[in-house]
Amino acid sequence: MFFEKDLAQIEERGSSLSEVELQIKNFQTGFPFLKVVKAATIGDGIIKLNQSQIEHFSRLYETNLPNKKVVKFVPASGAASRMFKSLFSFMESYKGTDKDQAKLESDQGFQSVFNFFQRIEDFAFFDELQEALKDHGSISELIEQKKHALIVEYLLTEKGLDYGSLPKGLLAFHSYGDTSRTPALEHLVEAANYGTTKGGKAYLHLTVSPEHRQKFTSHINAKKTSIEDHFGVSIDVSYSEQKPSTDTIAVDLENQPFRESDGTILFRPGGHGALIENLNEIDADIVFIKNIDNVVPDKIKGITYTYKKALAGVLLDFQHKIFHYLSVLENNQDVDLAEIESFLEKEICLLPPSGYSSYSKTEKVSYLKNKLNRPIRICGMVKNEGEPGGGPFWAENNDGSVSLQIAESAQIDQNDPTQNSLMQNATHFNPVDLICSFKDQNGNAFNLLKYRDPQTGFISGKSKDGKELKAQELPGLWNGAMSDWNTIFVEVPIETFNPVKTVNDLLREQHQN
């Protein structure tokens, strides 16, 4: 299956033959479905904070903030091309004929494109696009002349703004008078407002693609000082890239290595789960994780700040309790385990395996210490209003225990009526709003790679150069890559979740100033 040159290629990527062989085996056997026990709901796996609790936990966070190192961790390598899918299709087919114009104005399939042009002046990138097109006339004149395709060409290609090949984090999302901000800059502002620690320092870490790293650094360096001056803080921005060693092998339909025309093996990015390696290298007491496109203008950031602080306070509260119980277990041989068992089951929502009651006291102590002494994550959950994404569930683990997990639909057996019903009736979904701590009570960092479930990957069908192939993604960052963490779900308002999946999402009221 592998030749000498293949082994050299694998080694050069920083991987190992055993890892690649395991990936091949996963293609052959497939990944098992996650066994969902029930959906997490308010009062049964999801905490709903009242106003008094929000204020209490926010104060707890703010009180402890000066002595903590806080980092905002933002996966920012996502390409913007999918945002413009309808515009790419339009650009290729629209020729400016009367028939094309009628189709643009009446065809349901082009409704989003029609809306785009109707409100083009409401986009934060309008002035920049107008400048790029100045040699051809104003945008309003071009629309009148039915040169819609030219406008799109200057938006998406290197003739103009080149938005079709940029990462989402570098697009102008929000207008502020005569200037605008990209998602990258909005995350800088967020870091300044809820992550500033002792000495007025805030930290932002972006994971980026190698080809876009220089663009990110140039863009942020040009704007960072003005944001720092405005908020009176110093922001340390760092970057990392997805490691080539986390790429996974692609195979053909017979599960043989898929080879390029030159005979080399095709490796593909392993999905956002690969970023657990990047997260593992972050030195911080508290880490906020949020997607690059989930940002809003300043006018409605307040509720985001409120809940970020409250959830961070919940994290510190649970951390304090966990450290206390670990200390009790380590220093008191005669400890009554009932209180700690109740804490694990009722507050951490971790149910022991069926044989736990027959364990000796020594075995129970060892089990409890092992379950308590893990990374912690507080996960904001929003009410399910039809948005795509994973959801919060109680699920069975490999050791027979049951705990809270974020599960994607692909992880659940939808051909099983019971499992499918549990998925369909979930009340909440995952907006990727995590606050994490991965240091133990002695301040030592956990090795996050030890707390993954390797059996929660994904296999999908793709194609390359007209040939079908199968691709494999690693366990998702907030799915299998964090499956063995202590997990707490907290409801957050839908107003804190405003992703931009298509360009017209920027026309929503939440993204307009």
Image (cartoon, rainbow, N blue to C red):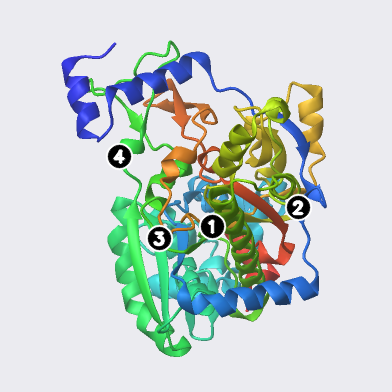
Q: Residue at x 67, y 65 (%)?
A: 496
**The C terminus: image quadrant:** bottom right
* Front of the two marks 1 and 4: 1
In the foreground, 504 or 6: 6
Q: Residue at x 71, y 57 (%)?
A: 490
User: First in sequence: mark 2 or mark 4?
Assistant: 2
User: Mark 1 sits on what residue?
Assistant: 436
Amino acid type indicated by mark 4? Pro
User: Mark 3 sits on what residue?
Assistant: 206
User: Mark 2 sits on what residue?
Assistant: 46
- Residue 244 is labelled as 4
In the foreground, 271 or 201: 201
Residue 501 visible here: no
Which element carries disc 2, helix, strand or loop? strand
Residues under labels 1 and 3: Cα distance? 16 Å
In the foreground, 11 or 508: 11
User: Residue 378: horizontal and vertical position, in percent?
Assistant: 62, 56
Q: Tell me the quarter of the picture where residue 4 sits.
A: top left
User: Residue 162: horizontal and vertical position, in percent?
Assistant: 39, 59
Amino acid type indicated by mark 3? Leu
